[in-house]
Image (cartoon, helix red, strand yellow):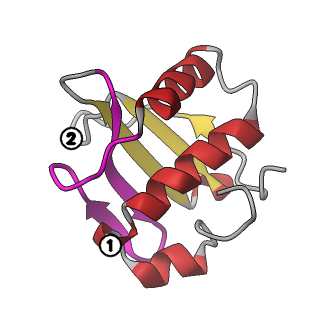
Amino acid sequence: MNDGLEFFITIMPDTRPADYCLGCLDGSVFIDFDNDEVGRISLKRISFDGYGCCDVKGQAIPMNEADSQAFKEIIKARIPDQSRLTTIVKRTLLNNRKFIWEDALNKYGLLQGDNL
């Protein structure tokens, strides 16, 4: 189950640098991630149509090693497994929800589902 998010890899303008950029929900949400100094993946920012861009760089709790490795493999393979990626991204958003606008997360249903 992928909850209809349908992640896609995208490229952001130079003014919005990130190691990994994902879009979902038909381009209504964009989520940027960076590699940290020990190779884990951290949420950098998330933008929502109607809300703007929420920058969490420097505050974010990184993915654990297993999720970081799986995330990199899924992205390198051009997202063959939407369900697995959805689980990893939702878990990351849940872990960092105190840094993200709750009303936007709720509106877009990014913390809903049983695959967290």
Front residue of 77 and 42: 42
Q: In this view, does 102 lie to the left or right of 38?
A: right
Residue drawn at point x = 54 percent, y = 48 percent:
89
Nearest the eye: 64 or 46:
64
Q: Which residue is drawn at 50% across and 28% down?
A: 66
In this rendered view, identify the residue nearer to me: 114 or 19: 114
For mark 1, does the 10 Å Cα neighbourhood hold few (<14), some (14 to 19), or many (20 or more) residues? Answer: few
Q: In which quarter of the image is residue 42?
A: top left
Tag of residue 98 = 1
- Secondary structure of residue under mark 2: loop
In the image, taking residue 55 as reference, residue 90 lies left or right, namely: right
Give amino acid for label 1: Lys
Badge 2 local density, few (<14 within 10 Å), some, or many (20+)? few
Find residue 102 and report its image quarter.
bottom left
Residue 8 x, y percent position in the rendering: 62, 37
Q: Does the segment drawn in magenta span residue 45?
A: yes
Q: What segment carries the magenta color?
A: 39-63
Residue 5 at what x, y percent from top left? 70, 54
In this picture, residue 34 sits left or right of residue 11: left
Disc 2: which residue: 15
Between marks 2 and 1, how big is the CA–CA gap?
25 Å
Secondary structure under the numbered disc 1 in the rendered image: helix
Horizontal arrangement in the rendering, residue 20 relative to residue 14 (left or right): right
Most foreground residue, 4 or 52? 4
Residue drawn where x is 44% and y is 37% of the image: 21
